[in-house]
Image (cartoon, coloured by chain):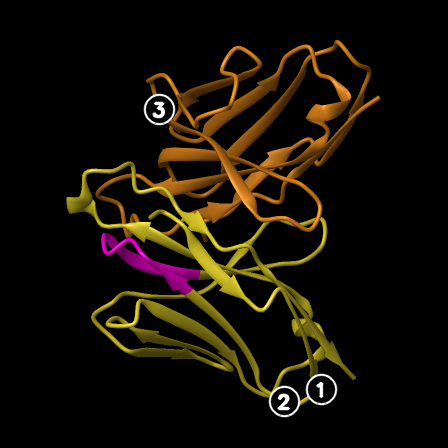
Chain colours: A orange, B yellow
Amino acid sequence: GAVVSQHPSRVICKSGTSVKIECRSLDFQATTMFWYRQFPKQSLMLMATSNEGSKATYEQGVEKDKFLINHASLTLSTLTVTSAHPEDSSFYICSAKLLLGTGPTDTQYFGPGTRLTVL
Amino acid sequence: QQQVKQSPQSLIVQKGGISIINCAYENTAFDYFPWYQQFPGKGPALLIAIRPDVSEKKEGRFTISFNKSAKQFSLHIMDSQPGDSATYFCAAQPSISSGSARQLTFGSGTQLTVLP
């Protein structure tokens, strides 16, 4: 159980275009979802925390107008990279925590990641 | 104070040997300490986790040792196998009572290579 999926797994786009990445909790409802960015051979850097039905909380230094997060339901969060540039190329990973009251809420379950390449 | 320091950066172990990865933290509000395993091009997968009320937790070949007074915890992989070759991240999360968003703070990662 506790499976998180991401779509697409890989995306290549031209500079200036927007890219949407979906994160879904497949077999559980998630109160909170997180979006991370990971550069090669580096650790995960938290970009934002999103709670269903409310605005995302962005980490310092993350442009909220560039990385739009929508958490429309308890099983789906989306990250849209707007006007992407080559420096946005990275591995984007989402994670989800169980809905409060449905089980242990400490554990973050991670998706498989999305490799974004901006040409 | 939010930092989690992880060492070593890389580790090479012979098949059958013991792999040991260490982490240290400063924030006493942390009360949940998971370890994640990540293969190239994949998302992290939860390996094992511990709370400060116990000093050790074992699941199969994986053991977490926790030293609350020293604010250190470590992952031991017994009988290491080539299939264990991956990057391992320790992490820490604040307690509910800390009033924070309870986000995970990750260590810098350890690249483990188990030689056949």
Report crowding for label 1: few under 14, some 14 to 19, many 20 or more residues within 10 A (C-alpha). some
Residue at the spot of label 3: A52
Tell me the residue at 69%/34% (across/down).
A90
Name the secondary structure under disc 1.
strand
User: Residue A26 in the image: x percent, y percent?
Assistant: 49, 40
Q: Nearer the viewer, mark 1 or mark 3?
A: 1
Q: Amino acid at mark 1?
A: Gln
Q: Is residue B26 above or below residue B114?
A: above
Main SS of the magenta segment? Answer: strand
Q: Which mark identifies residue B14?
A: 1
Count of numbered circles on the image: 3
- Which image quarter is the C terminus of chain A in? top right
Q: Chain of mark 1?
A: B
The magenta segment is: B24-34
Q: Chain of mark 3?
A: A
Q: Which mark identifies residue B17?
A: 2
Q: Amino acid at mark 3?
A: Glu
